[in-house]
Image (tube, coloured by chain):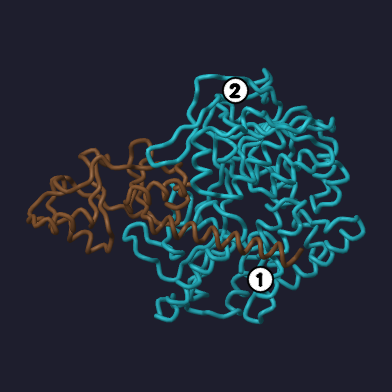
Chain colours: A cyan, B brown
Amino acid sequence: MFDRLPTPYGLVRHGVAPDHQKIKAVTRGFAETAADPRFRFYGNVEFGADLTLCDLQRLYHQVLFATGAQSERRMGIPGEDLCRSYPATEFVAWYNGHPDYRDLAFDLSAETAAIVGVGNVAIDVARILCLSPQELRRTDMAPYAVEALTQSRVRDVYLLGRRGPAQAAFTNPELKEIGELAQADVVVHPAEVQLDPLSMEELARSGDRLLARKVDLLQTYAARPPAGRARRLHLRFLVSPVALLDDGRGGVGGLRLARNRLARSVAGTIVAEATGELETLMAGVVFRSVGYRGVALPGVPFDERWGVILNERGRVLDPETEKPVVGEYAAGWVKRGPSGVIGTNKPDALETVAEMAADAAAGRVLSPADPSRAALDALLAASRVRPVSYADWQHLDALEAAAGERAGSPRVKFTSREEMFRALGRQ
Amino acid sequence: MKLEVVLAARGPRVLTIDAAASIRVAVARLAEHNIGALVVVDAAGHPIGILSERDVIRALAAGEDALALTVGDLMTSPVIAATPADDAEAVLQTMTTNHFRHVPIVDHGVLVGIVTIGDLVRAQLIEVRGEVVTLETRLMDA
């Protein structure tokens, strides 16, 4: 297993919210795999730079890509690139101590922040912006981010959804959680969470109890008088940003929002339709969380339209013939696009693995010239790569956990490659 | 889940046919690619209908010399098309209610894919299994 970062567990380490430690427990299952003598981890090895597809084809019978969806989708509206308009992904990577994002700076001096999107990442960002210093210190957030968020002047956080409460993508545990913040009130406009006839019909038809619970929770929030906490987390529905407004100095000063109503598409979806009414929301910082895209890998067929590796049930396809490319596979978000929860990757991966096993049984595999560990190690040594092994990671993991114990948090992460190599005694 | 996600998982294949083509040609294409429907497009590539194996079977059962007809004679038109932004669950519901199994996907007037009822069921199955795995992880470590 090759990872461009020195540490394993990509999204669990750098994407899952630092105050959601339980979810991170999925790594325990992977630790079992890592203990298998047939498994080896090579951290700090980048595909395409340190190791090419040609290299892998000389070393392995099968190659699987599980690189996720690393880039954010754009809103495509004026003002998107103003200062203090940030992709939520970068903010998340930054507060989670991702080595490539640790040096970014987020200006949190404005009093009002807007987050575009109502998925779980959007709600994570909103919650993080509302945590008290005590709550922040109980997480494994990067220490520099705890410091910056403690200094943050953001008091009002707006979460903006295009459609109504019944169409919001965030899940119930996340919604419930924001109602229990120590230092923030949840503010919901009663009119915006009253179900429209279409959503009501949909809810009655589907009998979806989780959805009913979600709407119910939102209506409870709408009826709850604010307790006068220091911060307010506003959930807004039926609004689409149509422009980010310049504050006159090249920074975000606000958002122009178009108000929507719900309609049904020809194919049956409840969609947002502009009413023609506009409103302005004054906000000094914007986080964009409207979706993700996979990033093309050198030499691997990629579907630009959907932002995934061209594949069928995990088998990489040749774009010309649409037939499987021998020995190449994909799993996870780079295979199916950014959907589902972490657990969705298990059935997704099983599907690919079944194809890999079938191909292996049928002899449809690559014919590597030198499928040996020695050949790989020689190749990496020649390209001056400094790989991090699984034993190295276990050492780093123990150090992080020990530092966490001293600080009263789950762990204190190493956030730069230099720190990690120093801790491993390899300058 | 949006249809764009279902399409991403499905691969790019969408087979089209001209309304003037014969049913014989259409049937051969369905068999060759082992699929159940062809999107009928005009000269500009816009979908104007859909021809499914059911359309052909219905004509055969009616005793017509179906193979001598054209695609335009038997296709279902106009066709209900979806966009990549449509919700998979809502579209699945529409398909079940209206008894059709294929939906062409059109993005700003351009045909970009097709989804079958099987694709939607499979996508939902993966999603539901994923939720089970996640809940199990939470419970086991609680």
> Residue at image x 66%, y 23%?
A281
Q: Position of residue A370 (x, y in %)?
A: 51, 79
Identity of the residue drawn at 44% across and 75% down? A366
Q: Which residue is mark 2?
A: A256
- The residue drawn where x is 26% and y is 62% is B33
Question: Where's residue A308, x and y in %?
Answer: 48, 53
Q: Chain of mark 2?
A: A
- Disc 1 packing (10 Å; few <14; some 14–19; many ≥20): many
- In the picture, the quarter occupied by the C terminus of chain A is bottom right
The residue identified by callout 1 is A41
The quadrant of the picture occupied by the N terminus of chain A is bottom right
Classify mark 1: helix, strand or loop.
loop
* Residue type highlighted by circle 2: Arg
Circle 1 or circle 2, nearest the eye: 2
Among numbered discs 1 and 2, the one appearing first in the sequence: 1
Residue A178 shown left or right of residue A167 in the figure: right
Query: Mark 1 and mark 2, same subunit?
Result: yes
Mark 2: few/some/many CA within 10 Å (<14, 14-19, 20+)? some
- The residues tagged by marks 1 and 2 sit, at their Cα atoms, a distance apart of 48 Å
Q: Is residue A77 above or below residue A327?
A: above
State the image coordinates of residue A2 (x, y, percent, origin top left).
Answer: 61, 66
